[in-house]
Amino acid sequence: MSGGIVIRGQAYQRPASLDVNMDTLTWRARRGVEPENIATTIHELRDVTWLEKRWSPGAGILAALSVVWIAQDIAVYGLVTLAVAIALSIHRWLRPRYWLGLDLGTRWLVMRVDPTCADHARRLADRIQVRLLTGEV
């Protein structure tokens, strides 16, 4: 992962980016009216979190509701709701949400990563995790 890579996504419900150039990370986001420009290196990070959220709480609630309706002999509503819950689950499984979290010690930088940048973000998280585990400099 050498060279300039830009990981795009959202932070604070606004567009954000993380520029990766060798070991240097530059975080650009806007929190309220104040812009954030934070420069650090992977050696200064204390932890990293990579999440691929492949489940849907809404689908779980709909599935539970469909079971209640089926148990009450309202089978038509129950089966339709179950079909919608299954469709939502399949959609979320095929299109997960990606999250990257970086611990700077004094604060966490959390970004919802765009699907097009997910591979770069996953590789960055793996690289940081290996550095944290091995103490690589």
Image: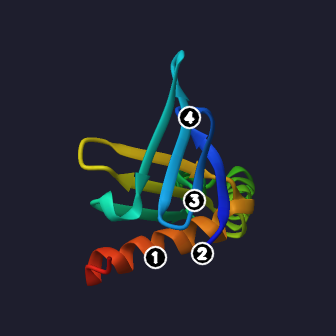
**Residue type at tag 4:** Ala
Q: Check whether the beta carbons of the residues at disc 1 and disc 2 lie within 8 A of each other.
A: yes
Whichever of labels 2 and 3 marks the residue nearer the N terminus, that label is 2
Whichever of labels 1 and 2 marks the residue nearer the N terminus, that label is 2
Identify the residue at horizontal 66%, vertical 61% (top origin). Answer: 5
Residue 29, which numbered label? 4
Whichever of labels 1 and 3 marks the residue nearer the N terminus, that label is 3
Q: Check whether the beta carbons of the residues at disc 2 and disc 3 lie within 8 A of each other.
A: yes
Task: Pick whichever, 68 or 3, lies toward us.
Answer: 3
In the image: residue 43, left or right of residue 113: left
Q: Name the secondary structure under disc 3.
A: strand
Q: Quadrant of residue 119?
A: bottom right
Residue named by callout 3: 20
Q: Name the secondary structure under disc 1.
A: helix
Whichever of labels 4 and 2 marks the residue nearer the N terminus, that label is 2
Number of the front mark, 1 or 2: 2
